Amino acid sequence: MSAGLFPRERAEVAPGAVHVPGWLSADRQRELVGVCREWARGPVPIRHTRLPRGGVMSVRTVCVGWHWQPYRYTRTADDVNGARVAEFPAWLAELGRAALTAAYGDGSGEPYAPDTALVNFYDGAARMGMHQDKDERSGAPVVSLSIGDTCVFRFGNTENRGRPYTDVELASGDLFVFGGPSRFAYHGVPRVLPGTADPALGLTGRLNITLRETGLRD
């Protein structure tokens, strides 16, 4: 029996961590795929991030607004080609505010002012280890948008990478927001489910767009 026969419900996975299934319409997903492809071509192209100890991340990442590399943000991608990253568009901030309202309720999105986006692309073999998003100087929530193949998203605790954690399947169009007590929870992607995206989307693999407030100034 297909799980698709039953609607998936909004769920609070942990205090401040909310999953809103199917939040992005099919048209909006296709628009975002097109925009992400433009960002991936530059001015700073999509790349595998190299970690300080020499490891290379299996996901490919392109940044908007601020360039992230472990463990800091800069305006220029000095670890790639030295170019300034693409500007963070106003419409993306509006999308982030709408996402917070959808997750937390009316009025919650008004003060939210994201200024960076990390766009991660997962092929069928890519993974993301358990980590905290803590390079920002702001404790504002993180907004995560999923497009393409479904993944297993592991959302853990704020103390360590181990249990307790909850595995959530994030499908194309899903919204996941974590803030408040869960803002610095460990999380990761242990598995992508290849071939689960709608072929009409025109995407093979998974895109994850995360919006954040850096709390930084030029």
Image (cartoon, rainbow, N blue to C red):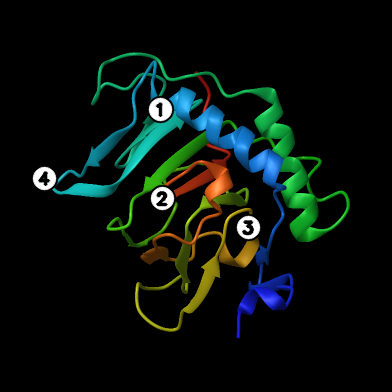
Disc 2 to disc 4, C-alpha distance: 26 Å
Q: Secondary structure at mark 2?
A: loop
* Label 4 with label 3: CB-CB less than 8 Å: no
Residue visible at 31% across and 59% down in the picture: 127
What residue is shown with label 4? 54
Question: Which of marks 4 and 1 precedes in the sequence?
Answer: 1
What residue is shown with label 1? 40
Residue 205: numbered disc: 2
Q: Secondary structure at mark 3?
A: loop
Q: Quadrant of residue 130?
A: bottom left
Q: Is residue 208 left or right of residue 24?
A: left
Q: Is residue 31 left or right of residue 38?
A: right
Residue 174: numbered disc: 3
Question: Which of marks 3 and 2 precedes in the sequence?
Answer: 3
Question: Which of marks 3 and 4 precedes in the sequence?
Answer: 4
Q: Quadrant of residue 45?
A: top left
Q: Secondary structure at mark 1?
A: helix
Disc 1 to disc 2, C-alpha distance: 15 Å
Label 1 crowd (10 A; few <14 / some 14-19 / many >=20): many
Question: Which of marks 1 and 3 precedes in the sequence?
Answer: 1
Closer to us: mark 1 or mark 2? 2
* Depth order, front residue of 30/186: 30
Task: Please provide percent x and percent y for residue 84.
Answer: 40, 15
Label 3 crowd (10 A; few <14 / some 14-19 / many >=20): many
Question: Which of marks 2 and 1 precedes in the sequence?
Answer: 1
Closer to us: mark 2 or mark 3? 2
Disc 2 to disc 3, C-alpha distance: 15 Å
Amino acid under disc 2: Gly
Q: Quadrant of residue 109?
A: top right
Q: Is residue 177 left or right of residue 218?
A: right
Task: Please provide percent x and percent y for residue 142.
Answer: 58, 50
